[in-house]
Amino acid sequence: MTSWNANAASASRFSPVCPKRQAEVVAKQQELDKLREELAEVRKDLFRQYQERRDRLAGLQQAVQTAAKKVQDRKLELDSTEQTTADVRADLTARQAAAEQRKRIGGRRPRRRSGAETA
């Protein structure tokens, strides 16, 4: 019995309250108690749903961060490869230009002299 019911019961001993009215009051109090319990259950369910959604979103956020890190790493790798390719291409272009220039001049690369020939 709730404290209100206890107070109502003790008050009924000292004041002339109609038994019908007292029964209505007790029924209303029981209904109110039931509604409070239902409200507490709804609140628990909503909090559980909130926690599940929060956990799911945290998982999704972690997945997005992991994917973003992979994309960044791959971009760095591609940038490095692109730079290396550009360097090799520039070197080959320079070599090709030098070879074509030698070809136009009709000359060949100068022969290196060995140490015995210079003396």
Image: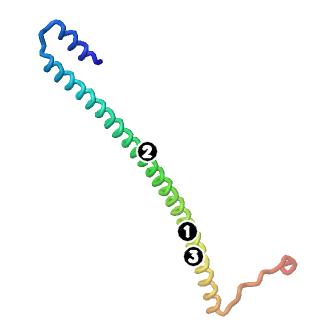
Compared to residue 21, the image places residue 95 above or below, namely below
For marks 1 and 3, give the one nearer the viewer.
1
Q: Name the one closer to the observer, 34 or 82.
A: 34
| Label 3 vs 2, first from the N-terminus | 2
Classed neighbour count for the residue bearing mark 3: other residues with Cα under 10 Å, few (<14), some (14–19), many (≥20): few
Q: Report helix, strand or loop for mark 3.
A: helix
Q: Evaluate if marks 2 and 1 touch, with contact meaning CB atoms under 8 Å apart.
A: no
Q: Name the one closer to the observer, 41 or 77.
A: 41
Classed neighbour count for the residue bearing mark 1: other residues with Cα under 10 Å, few (<14), some (14–19), many (≥20): few
Please state if 105 lies on the left or on the right of 44 as rendered.
Answer: right
Residue sitting at 39 percent across and 40 percent down? 48
Compared to residue 104, the image places residue 82 above or below, namely above
Q: Report helix, strand or loop for mark 1.
A: helix
Q: Name the one closer to the observer, 39 or 20.
A: 20
Residue sitting at 56 percent across and 65 percent down? 80
Judging by the rendered image, the residue that carries numbered circle 3 is 90
Judging by the rendered image, the residue that carries numbered circle 2 is 55
